[in-house]
Amino acid sequence: MSAYDRDAERQRMLSRRTLVLGGMQVAAVSALVGRLYYLQIVERDRYSMLADDNRISLRLVAPPRGQILDRFGVPLAVNEQNFSVTVVSERAGDVRQILDEVGKLVPLTEADERRIQRDLQRSRAFAPITIKENLSWDQVSAIEVNLPDLPGISIDVGQVRSYPFGEALAHVLGYVGAATDKDLEKSDDPLLTLPGFRIGKGGVEKQFDSALRGAAGTQQLEVNAVGRVIRELSRDNGQPGRETTLTLDAKLQHYVHQRLSAEMSAAAVVIDVRTGGIQALCSCPAFDPNQFAVGIGYDAYQALLKDERTPLINKAIAGQYPPGSTFKMITALAALESGIVNADHRVTCSGHIELGSHRFHCWRRGGHGTLDMVGALMNSCDVYFYDLAQRIGMDRIAAMARKFGLGDKVGLELPGERPGLVPDPAWKRRALKAAWHPGETLIASMGQGYVLATPLQLAVMTARLASGHVVQPHLAKSIEGQYREQTEWPRIDVKPENLAVVLKGMNAVTNIPGGTAYKSRITIPGMEMAGKSGSAQVRRISMAERSSGVRKNEDLAWRERDHALFVAFAPVDAPKYACAVFVEHGSSGGGVAGPIARDILLECQMLDAARASVAQQPEPATAPSRPDAGSTGQ
């Protein structure tokens, strides 16, 4: 090959390599341009969002919890300022020394110390750590004065739930507390994950928690690469919780709580006979819900758990007790409705009745003599109702009891309500796998044996007796202005003339001399009450004790004494309020529970009279305008 041909071949080879390299460069540049186009044009929104996420932190904001008011607008549960002291460790320098200095101004417990150390280990150095919440104004002032000598320390202002009526409304309102793991499993609301956020843990706070809680707001914060907050960009406070108005009368509730507090353990319920609205619902002893709202101490909580009077239990809705003689109206109505007996049916009480080889005693050892139905109710004669029970049987008695709200939950808007128990032969076969005995009918006819009722159920029973309607109790009057109360109820399925006989007997109990609660009557004309006393045994009295003499309640240990009960309505001629009072181991229904019911029903009517008087007063005349306040004076 000549030199010319070799040069030509070399030239062609260089040209091919140049083309290949050029093509590769063009491909690389094209790929780079394409990638840049994809990232900057096609994926622009996505990467812009990722960049903002790296710069902007979106956080939830807890909304204010809705207030709870009584029927007249009196605040029952509100939000108050909660002052807390916090520390930022990177600014504090020697954190231990700073905490010691703060401890001289605000007492810190060992539990506080452990919590603070745990939070310091878990959190970043620039994140504020809560040292102590619920500071008094004096404590806040002391820290503010010493802030120049406390680097990294600051005062934070939040909100805490407050209950102005304290123990008086503890069981009705409940309290708020931090969400537990179980709460988080049941709800997907992100609010529950916020540190310090509290939810309803009992009572109305729990029942209407979703409405009271509100909806979360959002806060946009600018942060740096390590999460340090630079500034707040925007804020939406969310939707505040809904305002909830109850049917309760705060003044009456406070009075009832004071009246019951003199007893070791008691409960009372007051119902508006016309609407079914709960005017008062009280259980004593109680607890201070404010302690729970801020975090109750271990020792204080253990003291509540160990108290034999069970202050944590709402006896008004969860206490199940033998209703005793307050049940006798049910037996009387069942007998009248059966048609087997009428109001003139007479029974001679000698102090006991025989059934087979068993003897069933009346509470009066010598007996009551011969009585009709009104007289039997007036004197609470056990033998008379034993006779009725033998004639009509337990099935009729049980059916009548259920018509009046016994034997099942009445559906009040409070968690923890218990159903009570109205037994019958079918129930015993099903629950106990045993046959019903005739003697059990006699015992049940006077509210003993298997029969159980809550004070709420007894109040509902009394409201239905007084009104003749199927009154349904309720606690919520309105939620966010939406009215929930009603005044129309279906008539109860009993003959009016039979109901009138029972009401006449209840009137005789309190307003005719010799009635078991005549001493507890209301003497103010137009405000008289009708009622029925009851004493329920909690121990069995042996034949040997009856022979030697039954021991008096005051000679027994507290837990062996009879329960005291009383149900009543007022005023007699135009019933407006129904009341049930229970005093645990109170011994005497007429002597102990009766005076309490009288005072409560009298207070109901006196409050009504006072409010009516205020409403009728003319408005004060408007003061004339002063010439020097804009008037011409002409």
Image (cartoon, grey):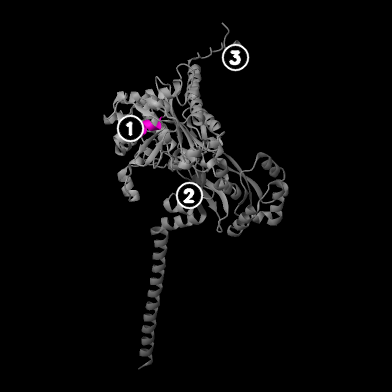
The residue that mark 2 highlights is 192
The residue that mark 1 highlights is 388
* Spot occupied by residue 609 in the image (x, y as percentages of width and height): 48, 19
Q: Which amino acid does label 3 sit on?
A: Ala
Q: Is residue 409 visible?
A: no
Q: Which secondary structure is most common in the magenta stretch?
A: helix
CB atoms of marks 1 and 2 within 8 Å = no
Looking at the rendering, the stretch of residues picked out in magenta corresponds to: 381-386
The residue that mark 3 highlights is 629
Q: How far apart are marks 1 and 2 (CA)?
A: 58 Å
- Residues 503 and 106: in front is 503
- Residues 485 and 223: in front is 485
Of badges 1 and 2, nearer the viewer stands: 1
Q: Dot 3 surroundings within 10 Å: few (below 14), some, or many (20 or more)? A: few
Give the structural element (helix, strand or loop) at label 2: helix
Q: Which numbered disc, 1 or 3, marks the residue that appears first in the sequence?
A: 1
Of badges 1 and 3, nearer the viewer stands: 1
Check residue 387 for magenta coloring.
no
Task: Specify the quadrant of the image occupied by residue 475.
Answer: top left
Task: Specify the quadrant of the image occupied by residue 394.
Answer: top left
Location of the N terminus by quadrant is bottom left
- Residues 373 and 94: in front is 373
Location of the C terminus by quadrant is top right
Picture residue at 51% right of the left edge, 14% below the top: 619
Q: Dot 1 surroundings within 10 Å: few (below 14), some, or many (20 or more)? A: many
Q: Which numbered disc, 2 or 3, marks the residue that appears first in the sequence?
A: 2
* Spot occupied by residue 599 in the image (x, y as percentages of width and height): 51, 26
- Residues 140 and 335: in front is 335
Q: What residue type is labelled 1?
A: Leu
Give the structural element (helix, strand or loop) at label 1: helix
Q: What label sits on residue 353 in the rendered view?
A: none
Check residue 385 for magenta coloring.
yes
